[in-house]
Image (spheres, rainbow, N blue to C red):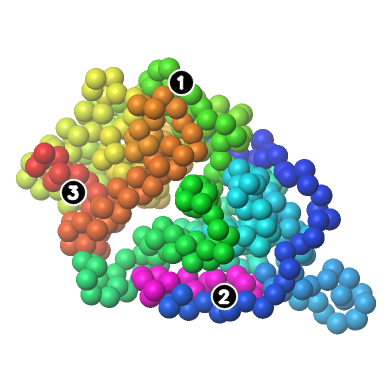
Amino acid sequence: MHVESAKVPLPLSTQSTEQPAPAAQSVPQFTADSFDNQPGAEMLATRLNAFNENISVILNAKKSETEKTGTEKPDTGGLDASDIALMCQNFTSAFNLDNILVQESTQLKAIQILLTLTNCHDIDSLKAFANSKLHENPDNQDDCQKLKDSADMDNDNPITLPPGYGMTSQNFSFFRDQLMNSFIDSQFSEANFETKEMDQLKDALRMAKMQIAGNTGIGNFKESITFDQFDREQVSKLTGSLIYPRQKLCADNLAKEIMALQQQLFDSDSELIDMLGNNEDITKLLQGNQPYHLKQLLARQGADNRATLTNDAALLVSFVARNSIFADKFAKLGINPENLTHLAKAHSILNHGQADEQKELSNEIAAKGLKGSDDFTRTFFKSETANKYKAEPPFARIALWLAESNQSG
């Protein structure tokens, strides 16, 4: 069963769309120097300038321009200044940033870095984000998928690195987090945010990046989730909430599917575990005793009645699930790979956020867990194994990396 996020709309801002829109104004051009020439800086600068140009067109356009002057009005995708104002309001509300992003100019800056980092900076993407992602009505899931597809392109968008990085190249998505931090530190300096407010903004944008790239529900929790037992049933519920933070029906439906998937992942004799441990595509780089050690790693997931996958296994499951070459195999097992991806990411977030120790899942814990999870993934991509076998798909390199680590450990 596929969970349709469109079935439960995200509440929109109750503020009037007639409020003054962000003022169109001349802004300086970004360059790689704007971000200290760090990896990806030039690409980010190009996107930021394109975003500013497109926003300027929208804010300066008048819906009645064609009728009044007889001239063809600029292509704004049907958006005008009031649509941008509402987009800013809805985004700010969805991420509980009302007391931080008070000015519309700062709201728009936050959206600017979010969309440029996810490769969604053209007018069509702006329209999809404003009218689809934040609204989540039943007719717009194609637009949300387009945002995800644009973000996914950065997984294959190479950046040439200067000496000293230990790698010759890496994809743009690898540097999103440090580029985001650099943008916020420089562009929000005049806002006089306290450290806590700056961290809250970074956390919100980090979650929003994941939600665009994963085509999930968007927003932060309205309030923290507390629990007494951190068991598999609770983890399935927390996974649903992480993926759909403001859509309870979608979260509940996904939780049921996650519970069924967990049963297979924690059963060392299940067909899914057998496939992960024996599939030639996954194990193509393994030699000697490495297949044994990978199987041992996977088989141990159910040991001691643990509630989540280990970070190692979650990383492998995540990259296997997102690769289309396994679609037929998952179909035969009755598994929706999208849900398997959600499970793996959520388990990693819960592990890195130490939700089991806190007996709570808050926005701060989720953001901490997401950062830790992303850092863990980057650790793999910086590894000797990942770079030595760069021509091989990530899941094969991860399997080798895990087998080697498990063997030495």
Outermost right residue:
68
Specify which label sits upstream in the sequence, 1 or 3.
Answer: 1
Say if 220 sits above or below 73 in the image. Answer: above
Residue identified by numbered label 3? 400
Q: Can residue 320 be seen in this view?
A: no
Specify which label sits upstream in the sequence, 2 or 3.
Answer: 2
Q: Is residue 336 left or right of residue 128?
A: left
Say if 81 sits above or below 50 in the image. Answer: above
Q: Do the residues labelled 1 and 2 touch (CB within 8 Å)?
A: no
Residue identified by numbered label 2? 49
Q: Which mark is residue 227?
A: 1
User: Could you tell me how many numbered marks the image carries?
Assistant: 3
Residue at 38% from the left image edge and 20% from the top image edge:
231
Q: Label 2, label 3: how many angstroms apart (C-alpha)?
A: 41 Å
SS state under label 1: loop
SS state under label 3: helix
Residue at 39% from the left image edge and 30% from the top image edge:
355
Q: Nearer the viewer, residue 298 or 405?
A: 405
Residue 39 lies in the magenta-colored region: yes
